[in-house]
Image: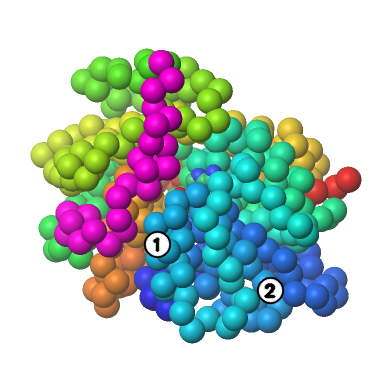
Amino acid sequence: MSSIHVLENQAFLTYLSGILDAHFFAKGHSEPLRALEVGCGAGHFSRILSAHYGSKIKITAIDANENVIKKANELSEGLVEGSVTFKQADFNKYSDSAPYDVIVFTKSFHHCLPINEAAKNAWKLLKNNGLIVAEELIRDYPPEHTIQWYFDHFDPLVAAKVIDPVETLSSGHFGPDPQEQQHQGHHDHGHNHGHEHNHGHNHGHNHGHNHGHNHGHNHGHGHDHGHSHGGPEAQLQRLNQFCDPKKSATERWNIFYDATHGLPEKKELIDTIVNVFGNANTRVTDTLPFIYHHYVFCGQVFFSILKDTEEGRAALAKMIADEEQAVRSGEITPIGMNIVAEKVE
Ligand SMILES: C[S@@+](CC[C@H](N)C(=O)[O-])C[C@H]1O[C@@H](n2cnc3c(N)ncnc32)[C@H](O)[C@@H]1O
């Protein structure tokens, strides 16, 4: 197993296994746990979770994008038969003949639009007392000093070529932009809802509150995220701009932010889950480091960018430690959040 992914997923594995141990195994759950991972990408987390629990867990891992499922299957040769089953499926339309003990969203709940349908489907797919556990990005526009901190850490790694986004992109390793593919034909619903905003305006003065991009996002179209990523050339252009230290930190951050335009922010994610599962059954931890994930896998927009070399792994380990420290000391605003909710009928 590629160890950069083990390192990247360590914190969430610890969090999730703590919950599963307490909620199921410590209470004498003896059957293999039926788990569903949603938005599994190339399947790194499912393989890590399976390696952690062995025969105590049976995982189905789905992703809407067939390219990543193909990749996941390629990477899973040699895995114990039946321990992890990868399937191409849109979670919002997903059904199964038997219910699950746990549904895990790995940075994917905010993609399963509309998320109220996703939350309802999760409820439907769970056994009573089953859990959803969502590892989530807080997409709300961060304060400028947090963005600056991001690039202060990012730039030296790019300069040292430990991160080489352009090389990764041009390797074609991940195939075409998955969301672009996924949403082909969905862009033309005649509701150009105002996100061709003025990129030149000053984002830099926002400290903690939503900046001006956040308008009209809830356009209520299940399929259309409203963020066309363009083809490979557009991706390359975005990457080059994102990596350009001559641009201001906020200008660079906006390239990422705008490319994920229309995806729900923190309050909407929490409210949606609370609406379906109930306040008393939902727990939120919203003080988690997350920036480091962008170095390994920067969303659908930049793909995997940190090299899985000794140098790359050392850089990631340092980044994780630095970010934990910066969050703990209050130097930066955390952009990671976990949500766990129990189905109580
Ligand atoms: C940010 S990526 C996370 C990938 C991986 N879990 C990780 O942690 O690196 C989100 C993933 O969710 C998938 N996705 C988006 N919408 C989905 C849906 N409705 N159903 C299933 N998967 C979806 C995307 O294709 C993508 O692979």
**Residue positioned 83% across, 73% down in the render:** 29
Residue 44: x percent and y percent? 47, 67
Q: Quadrant of the N terminus?
A: bottom left
Is 49 placed above or below 88 here? below
The amino acid pointed to by label 1 is Ile
Q: Is residue 130 magenta?
A: no
Residue 101: x percent and y percent? 76, 61
The label on residue 320 is: 1
- In front: 113, or 156? 113
Residue 12: x percent and y percent? 55, 62
Label 1 vs label 2, nearer the camera: 2
Could you give the CA–CA distance between mark 1 and mark 2, rounded to whole angstroms? 28 Å
Q: For residue 157, what is the image quadrant?
A: bottom left
Q: Is residue 279 left or right of residue 188?
A: right
The amino acid pointed to by label 2 is Ile
Q: For residue 130, what is the image quadrant?
A: bottom right
Q: Residues within 10 Å of mark 2 (few under 14, many from 20)?
A: some
Can residue 278 be seen from the camera position used here?
yes
**Residue positioned 23% across, 49% down in the render:** 152
Q: Is residue 229 left or right of residue 278?
A: left
Label 2: which residue?
57
Which region is colored magenta?
A: 164-190
